[in-house]
Image (spheres, rainbow, N blue to C red):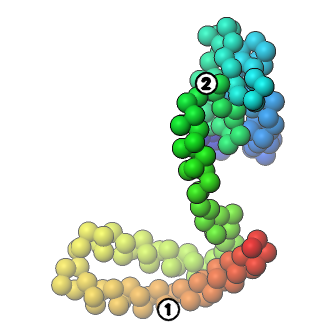
Amino acid sequence: MIAVATNSKNPERAALVLDYMKSDVDLNRTLLGGIQGEHWDLNEEGQRMVLDAAENYSWNSWAWALNRADEPVMAGTDERELAISDSINSRELFAEVAGFTFDSSSVATELSVVNSIVDEYEYSFSLGIYGDNTEAKFNEFKGKLEAAGLDKVTEAMKTQYEAFAAKNS
């Protein structure tokens, strides 16, 4: 992972640089593997070959956070490994919620109270502290959440998600 420090003078610019380092194929491959034609090159099949100078700049020796899905495969990789990777990649599932971000501004107060209530009860339920009184405490917890506006928060999130899903389906 690469992060931008909170005390950065220009965090937006730093984020742009990180985005460029990952999204620009030529820069990304230079950072990951050194100079094409000196440290590595691509063969006719588009596979990566190690050149003599690679001992001075081995592929992906420091920039692992910049990895891309389309990195060239190492020449000579066992065909069985490639077949397994292709099989796995072809069956990869993507969550329907991927890319959805809840804008809680319309229910910020309610959400804050709901989170506070969850924080108050969470560990006691997890640790079984309530013992025989667990069901009564759960009903108390549920009542507090409802009084705090959980339904309003849920409805806001559901509305936003449905709009997101309709736009992205």
Indicate the secondary structure of the residue bearing disc 1.
helix
Across and down, in percent, residue 65 comes to 62, 37
Query: Height in image: 140 above or below 86?
Result: below
Q: Name the quadrant containing residue 103.
A: bottom right
- Of pointers 1 and 2, the one earlier in the residue sequence: 2
Q: Nearer the viewer, residue 155 or 45?
A: 45
Across and down, in percent, residue 43 comes to 75, 23
Q: Nearer the viewer, residue 82 or 38?
A: 82
What amino acid is found at the position of numbered circle 1 in the picture?
A: Ala
Farthest top residue? Answer: 52
Across and down, in percent, residue 49 comes to 68, 20
Query: Height in image: 83 above or below 121?
Result: above
**Residue 142, visible in the rendered structure:** yes
For the point 58% across and 57% down, the residue is: 91
Farthest left residue? Answer: 132
Q: Nearer the viewer, residue 62 or 132?
A: 62
Indicate the secondary structure of the residue bearing disc 2.
loop
Across and down, in percent, residue 30 comes to 75, 24
User: Which quadrant is the N terminus positioned in?
Assistant: top right
For the point 70% across and 32% down, the residue is: 72
Q: Nearer the viewer, residue 151 or 160?
A: 160
User: Which quadrant is the C terminus positioned in?
Assistant: bottom right
Instruction: Give the label on residue 163, or none.
Output: none
Residue under circle 1? 147
Residue under circle 2? 76
Q: Disc 1 and disc 2: Cα gap in Å? A: 63 Å
For the point 53% across and 37% down, the residue is: 80
For the point 58% across and 28% down, the residue is: 77
What amino acid is found at the position of numbered circle 2 in the picture?
A: Gly
